[in-house]
Image (tube, rainbow, N blue to C red):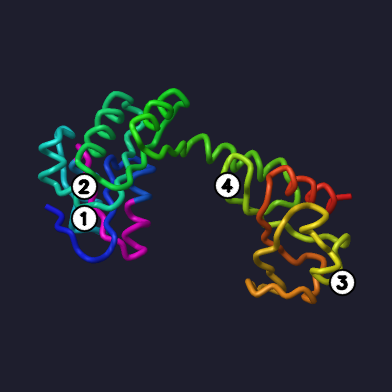
Amino acid sequence: MLNKKNNEMYGVIGLGHFGSALAKTLSEAGKDVLVLDCNESKIKEALSYTDHAYTVDHLSKETLQEAGIRNCDTVIVCIGEKIDTSILTVLTVIGLGVKRVIAKAISYEQGIVLEKLGAEVVYPERDMAVRLANKLTTSRIMEYITLSEEIDISELKLTRKLNDITIVEANLRKKFGLNIIALKHNGETSIEIEPDQMLMENDIIVVVGKRLNIKQLENYLNV
């Protein structure tokens, strides 16, 4: 059973590709991780990075309580393929009083139900597909993070259109409604952006703003 310590604790239920990668990454980041799965071989693998890995035949309230899932600050339910099990497990974990519950969904309809239960919903397959499509169809956007339905953080590689001018001269905030939050020049990244900082072709800027505005800047750089 996992006992509460001072540092933040995470519970991962379901060790498919998504759940296994998530649990291992959290553990490598120094977090306490509790993992549960019905597959004994997957649990044996998980014991290489956490002491709190348990084989469970079913995800009843009693089983989750015994494992110590209620001691976790955040629980991620990674069993999206089994929709009925996913929904019942989310309902049980929320009922046990876990502060934050995140659930994997494989369909919009499943996600709607999980959200109504009070879980945050992620769509790993859809998000990866969107991420790949964006990288394939944009020539200047190197990487991005979605913050909301409209807002992204994106990396863009500069062209000669913004070569040898200062941040204030580029004036991306006024022209495109974007804020530069980081600049990479000659392999060195800075987050202390000064108005008189020079921009050079092939520099990489990290901007935050509306997705439409980022697209407009990308089009401007490509002209």
Tell me the mark number nearer the camera, choosing from 4 and 3.
4
Q: Earlier in the sequence, mark 3 or mark 2?
A: 2
Q: Earlier in the sequence, mark 4 or mark 2?
A: 2
User: CA separation, marks 1 and 4?
Assistant: 33 Å
In the image, residue 145 sits, relative to residue 95, either above or below, namely below
Determine the residue positioned at 31% across, 39% down: 77
Q: Are marks 4 and 2 in contact (CB under 8 Å)?
A: no
- Residue at the disc numbered 3: 164
Determine the residue positioned at 75% across, 48% down: 139
Q: Earlier in the sequence, mark 1 or mark 4?
A: 1
Range of residues picked out in magenta? 23-39
Question: Judging from the image, what secondary structure is the residue with disc 2 in?
Answer: helix
Question: How many badges with numbers are in the image?
Answer: 4
Q: Are marks 2 and 1 in contact (CB under 8 Å)?
A: yes
User: In the image, which disc is placed on residue 146?
Assistant: 4
Question: Judging from the image, what secondary structure is the residue with disc 3 in?
Answer: loop
Please state if 62 lies on the left or on the right of 118 as rendered.
left
Please state if 115 lies on the left or on the right of 201 as rendered.
left
The x and y percentages for residue 136 are: 68, 42
Question: Judging from the image, what secondary structure is the residue with disc 4 in?
Answer: strand
The x and y percentages for residue 87 are: 30, 28
Q: Earlier in the sequence, mark 4 or mark 3?
A: 4
Q: Earlier in the sequence, mark 3 or mark 1?
A: 1
- Residue at the disc numbered 2: 43
Q: How many residues crowd mark 4 within 10 Å: few (<14), some (14–19), many (20+)?
A: some
Question: Judging from the image, what secondary structure is the residue with disc 1 in?
Answer: loop
Please state if 189 lies on the left or on the right of 54 as rendered.
right
User: CA separation, marks 2 and 1?
Assistant: 6 Å
- Residue at the disc numbered 1: 47
Residue 129 drawn in magenta: no
Q: Nearer the viewer, residue 68 or 141?
A: 68
- Please, what is the three-letter code of the amino acid marked with disc 3? Asp
